[in-house]
Image (tube, rainbow, N blue to C red):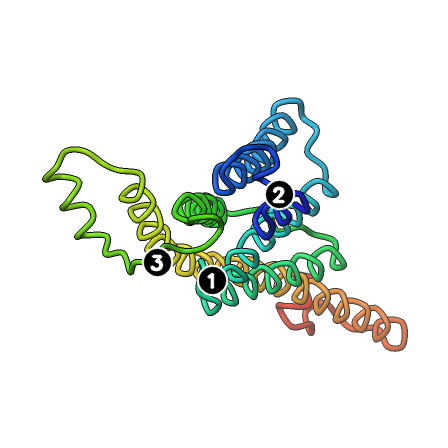
Amino acid sequence: MPILVVVLLTNVASKFGMPQQILGVSLFLAAALTDLLDGFLARRRGEVTTLGTLLDPIADKLLISAAFISLVETHVAPAWAVVIIIAREFAVSGLRSIAATEGFTIAASKMGKLKMATQVLAITLLLLGTVNGLPPSDNPNFGQILLEITKTKDITIDQFRLFCYSAGRGMLWIVVFSSLYSMVGYFYKFYGKVRNRFEVRQKRRRLRELMRRRKEKPIAENDLPMEEKNL
């Protein structure tokens, strides 16, 4: 993550004789692929742990947040979209922390995995659309660029960059939507588990109260409410 930030915000790539966007995309995709690989190996070898379940999404959030914040710094990505995306990550991390203190974990949902995939795609497209780390000087129109490419049946480097940048900005809308949608799913799971635990605690409290009352004064079983009989 720190190496990626340095590459995106400085001209260190020129010292290696590589375009900044190519080196940045290479580092970012390598980090994303290793994250995918370690989850695959953990499941295949049966080494999934509670600690790994908690740490894995933190690594994802650090990588994605660093890339998006760097893109905001270089005016490639709009700040409002990145604020929503990162705020969602903080909210879900908070839920996971509370869940951990309550003794349970909230596993990643399919929508959460889709959100991660769209984030990786959006960042990759935006990086490929930059010129020396900066957004294109022209205001690209995705439909117009696609029409020009279709007519000429050829694509120049500039057209490719404009195409990637425009597609990346469009993909950000999908990222924002999937982030908010998956956050609602996490809140729903969290509420369901907390509610179940609260109901169990209430039943145990009523059971202790019932036992205390029985010690003080014997109560016939037929006189008990149906709910207390079930306890």
**Residue extending furthest top?**
45
Give the side of residue 35 with respect to residue 137, left or right: right
From the image, tell me which residue sits under label 3.
Answer: 137
- Badge 1 marks a residue whose secondary structure is loop
How far across and how far down the image is residue 35, in percent? 60, 36
How far across and how far down the image is residue 49, in percent? 72, 37
Q: Residue at x 35, y 58 (%)?
A: 137
Q: Amino acid at mark 2?
A: Val
C-alpha distance separating marks 3 and 2: 22 Å
Q: Nearer the viewer, mark 2 or mark 1?
A: 2
From the image, tell me which residue sits under label 2.
Answer: 12
Q: Rate crowding at label 1 as few (under 14), some (14 to 19) or many (20 or more) other CA atoms within 10 Å.
A: few
Q: Residue 126 or 161: which is nearer the viewer?
A: 161
C-alpha distance separating marks 1 and 3: 11 Å
- Badge 3 marks a residue whose secondary structure is loop
Which numbered disc, 1 or 3, marks the residue that appears first in the sequence? 1
Q: Residue at x 70, y 29 (%)?
A: 47
From the image, tell me which residue sits under label 1.
Answer: 75
Which numbered disc, 2 or 1, marks the residue that appears first in the sequence? 2
The answer to which image quadrant residue 124 occupies is top left
How far across and how far down the image is residue 119, in percent? 46, 49
Give the side of residue 144 with respect to residue 156, left or right: left
- Badge 2 marks a residue whose secondary structure is helix
Q: Residue at x 60, y 33 (%)?
A: 16
Q: Amino acid at mark 3?
A: Ser
C-alpha distance separating marks 2 and 1: 19 Å
